[in-house]
Image (cartoon, helix red, strand yellow):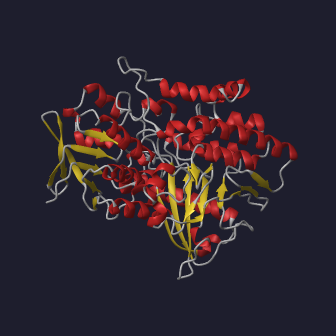
Amino acid sequence: MPSFDTIIIGAGPNGLAVAHRLASKGAAVLVLEAAATAGGGAGLAHLSYNLDPRVEKAMGLAAHGLEWASADLATTALSPDGNHLRLEGPVGERLFGDVSDADRAAWSTLRARLLRFAAVLSPLNQMAPPRIAKGVGNPMLKLAMIGIKARMMGAKDFRELGRIILTNAHDLLDDELSDPRLKGALAFDATLGGWLGPRSPNSVLPWLVRLSGQVAGKQGALGLPKGGMAALGAAMVKATAAKGVTIRCNAAVERILVEGERVAGVILAGGEEIRAARVVSAIAPKTTLLSLVGARHLDAGLVTRARHQKARGGAAKLHLTLRAAPDFRGANLKDRLLIAGSEHDVERSFNPVKYGRVPERPGMEIMIPTAHELKPDGKYHLSAIAQFAPHAPADRVAARAEMLAACLAQLEANAPGIGALVEDAEILMPYDIEARYGLPGGQWHAGELSVEQMLFLRPLPGIAQYKGPVPGLWLASAGCHPGGGVSGSAGWNAALAMEAAG
């Protein structure tokens, strides 16, 4: 059997990114993936908003098949009466529709301000969080440099950033705008993938993190790869394999071997033992610590913190096969389509989920990739993220059926007749996402991306610099800084931290 010095658990975007980087520096790397195919969460997503430019360039993804069907998707905020609002350019640079001059001017000002703030914070995505502890030199230097950059925006912007960074998205939008379609679309984006509504405290900061992403060099843009997001995962797989990395699928890790208080390898579900002095986990930290390492090898305080890490998924994923193209009252099917209504509608869709119930009118982000690339069979495929969905309802079967019915009703209200076009429907609730992708609670960031679980608190205090609590163990999943999305950032940052550690 070949000898490996590094074993990586999980062949998602972060696992592949760290594998590529380490192999580029001469490491002998084995990647173990529990699923039948590599790519991980790239298959769960349906558009790109934060692919790390370091990863895209260093992995040479274009040379390995990554092409963009669109690198600047427009967004249409749907109205049941056909009075849609279309946002073109990154983060709605241009508005088309019946919008007042006052709202156009106010949004232009607010948009520019938010993008400036996000750009100031974006360097945080490409660095390990500083350690807040004694005896670690000057841990705040990088944060201080970002603070200086923020101060250089000018006194007015600096004060405004300090004012809004921990506020809620609803109040920010309500103070500046009046158009309910625009506020609904923005409130939906601010809370997408999170366990929080627009009125929840601290809902602006995760939005700024989202706005710091880019596609093809454009901050705030949304992209769709040719062949869908699975094609992005496939390009990462090819790039990683080209570096000599061995990728094994259908290879679920049952336990991380710990001998003499340090990592010694892994044991697979079938009993196979593979030894290596370094193990990198690119799956959820909670799963890694509590299931793969085990409490007996960890400090009691860390075990308690891991058990209490928040990982509540609030989104469901809907897939429909349609026999013909739907008509969303004239909306361009190549756009990202949003059903959000207003900021109040987004909040109302979150309220019942807090209590384990399905909302009557969930918000929806809809993509129809076959509008960009029609399949030979002529069928149309619709992919939607529905917010919000309960992660722990009392009756999972009933909740799934109720959620599907609610989503289909929302679609029918905005695209009359679409129900008659449906040939096949599948909805994945957060608990289904957990079962299929191994994400605790179905939380697609592998741990909630909230203020108390960001930066040097992510995934947990004391292990926020990618170095695990057992010598030889490293953490590199979306549950680490800077968070989720198909970015590869956490994996790349982890590889850099390993290089620095020697």
Position of 362 with respect to 1 (left or right) is right
The answer to whether residue 218 is visible is yes
Residue 106, position as x, y percentages in the image: 80, 40
**In the displayed structure, does residue 332 sit left or right of residue 69?**
right
Q: Residue furthest bottom?
A: 377
Q: Is residue 270 left or right of residue 473?
A: left
Relative to 478, is 83 above or below? Answer: below
Going by the image, does 284 lie left or right of 123?
Answer: left
Examine the image and state in which quarter residue 329 appears.
Answer: bottom right
In terms of image quadrants, where is residue 447? top left
Percent x, y for residue 166?
A: 60, 29
State the image coordinates of residue 392 (x, y, percent, origin top left). Answer: 43, 45
Quadrant position of residue 374: bottom right
The mark total stands at: 0
Residue 170, position as x, y percentages in the image: 68, 37
**Along the viewing direction, whichever of 260 and 152 lies nearer the viewer:** 152
Q: Residue furthest front?
A: 25
Res. 52 in view: no
Q: Quadrant of the C terminus?
A: top left
Q: Closest to the observer: 264 or 254?
A: 264
Residue in the picture at 69% in, 63% down: 414
Q: Is residue 354 above or below residue 298?
A: below
- Going 61% across and 39% down the picture, which residue do you hit? 119
Looking at the image, residue 250 lies above or below residue 356: below
Extreme residue toward the top, this view: 134
Q: What quarter of the picture does the N terminus occupy?
A: bottom left
